[in-house]
Amino acid sequence: MISAVVPTCRGRARLERNLGSVAASLAASGEPWEIVVVDDAGGGLNGLDAPARILALPENRGYGPAVNAGADAATGDYLLVLNDDVRLEPGTVSALRARFPDPTLFAAVPSIRSPLAACGDEGGKAGEFAAGLLEIREVEADGAHPTLYPVGCCYLCPRAEFLDLGGYDDAFAPFFWEDVDLGYRAWARGLRTLHVPEAACDHEGSATLSESRTLDERERISFRNRVLFHLRNLRDPARRASSFGAWAAFALFETRPERLEGLAQAFARDAADPRRRGRGPSDAAILDLVSPR
Amino acid sequence: MARDVLEEILSAALHEKAIAQDGIADFAAGLRDRARLILEERLRPLQDRVDTLEKENAWRAESIEGLTGENERVKDENRRLKDENGRVKDENRRVREEHARLLDEIGRLKEESRAVQDECGRLKEEMEGVRAEWRTASAAHDRLLQHHRGVVRGAAESLGAVADLPVWKRGQSRARLADIAAALRRDTA
């Protein structure tokens, strides 16, 4: 069974635009399915005309916690994690589902056509270390290839693996970088994420965020979570030392207050809830695995 | 706030030995390379501004060069116009002098014209006098002619009367002829 988990906050119009395509794609897969719409305390979903179960959260905590709540409430073997502004094609779910079962695979990501993507596809990601930090870039591909992380707006993964990884890290709430963190943790366990271009969807593009957050606020959160990602994930001592040097450079030379605020908040969040980084592939090995050949 | 964050970062780095012997080179590389990027990012608007100003400066220099050339051209033109102006002034002076000369000539001609007119008036008057004299002479001549005609007619009538006298009145005829001759003599003296 496939459970689509769709977090939303005041996204009724987007759901009404897109849920029909989700249901059609799920139905076309030939598997039992359900749609769990997680209302992140936005309200306004009474009488939603869609084949979906509404899970209303008591408080707004953001994308990661909402997906985690949906994953807990879901009953399927697979989670189809979706943003409310994503439209699927009839064959999207089938093409993703065909990649499973695979004990080495954590998630399958479709081609995500989006105005946000420089190359037109948000789905493929590679990373490299530069000046102490991980820099992520889009990767175009004709065929399936490893990708750094399952982009949060659309992917399919076994629910058990998602839960076993602990789902999204609440430290990243309300949004940004939680999907990078999840994918990186999976890679660190030896679980791949695959970009599957034969599956495709359309993403309207951060519709919820642009409606509810100022640019400065988004920059602060994005930067905070970028720092947090490095603090909580890097294992190679040399990479960590280099990243500390980079953060020191930001502390010394950065002038944007929202970034300095995000920097301070990241260290405070990490200190409040430190993560134990277990054994696994090195950072260099992970990035090498997702580098385009 | 930045100093507190820095302390926190350095503290965490120390805790992880990132700024101990093993990690110090990587820490320094991260610091140096990232600082360069941050400063480049901060400098980019200034660099863009500098680039813009340099472009503007080049444009201004080009404009100044163009304007300087234009200025030289205008100066040359000005010089040429001054020369032309001098030439025109000379010409003007010459024309004025010519004008004055012509005015004098006109004055002289006017005076001459007046003198001619006066002479003409005088000649007209003289001609009128001559005409009047001619008319007087002509009238006198007419009168004299009339008189002579009367005398001749009288003589002719007297001669006719003499002719009609009978031969025997030769004495009377002679006397009458002598009267006639006397009368004619008087009128032709």
Image (cartoon, rainbow, N blue to C red):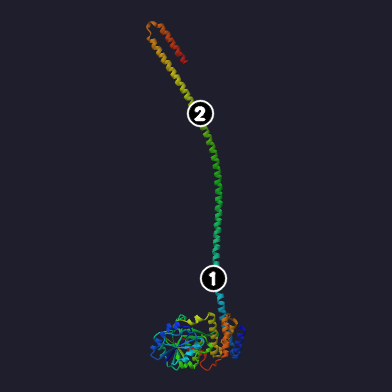
**Outermost residue, top side:** B168
Name the residue beneath numbered marker 1. Answer: B55
Which class describes the residues within 10 Å of circle 1: few (<14), some (14-19), or many (20+)? few
Name the residue beneath numbered marker 2. Answer: B126
Give the residue displayed 50% in from the left and 82% down from the top.
A209
The number of callouts visible is 2
| Vertical side of B140 occupied by A87: above or below | below
Residue sitting nearer the eye, A77 or A291: A77
- Tag 1 subunit: B
* Quadrant including the N terminus of chain B: bottom right
- Spot occupied by residue A20 in the image (x, y as percentages of width and height): 41, 85
**Amino acid type at mark 1:** Lys
- Spot occupied by residue A206 in the image (x, y as percentages of width and height): 48, 82
Which badge, 1 or 2, comes first in the chain's sequence?
1
Residue sitting nearer the eye, A56 or A254: A56
Visible residue check, residue B106: yes
Instruction: Determine the secondary structure under disc 2.
Output: helix
* Left or right: A269 in relation to B132: right
Instruction: Determine the secondary structure under disc 1.
Output: helix
Visible residue check, residue B29: no
- Tag 2 subunit: B
The part of the image, by quadrant, that contains residue A5 is bottom left
**Amino acid type at mark 2:** Glu
- Spot occupied by residue B148 in the image (x, y as percentages of width and height): 44, 17
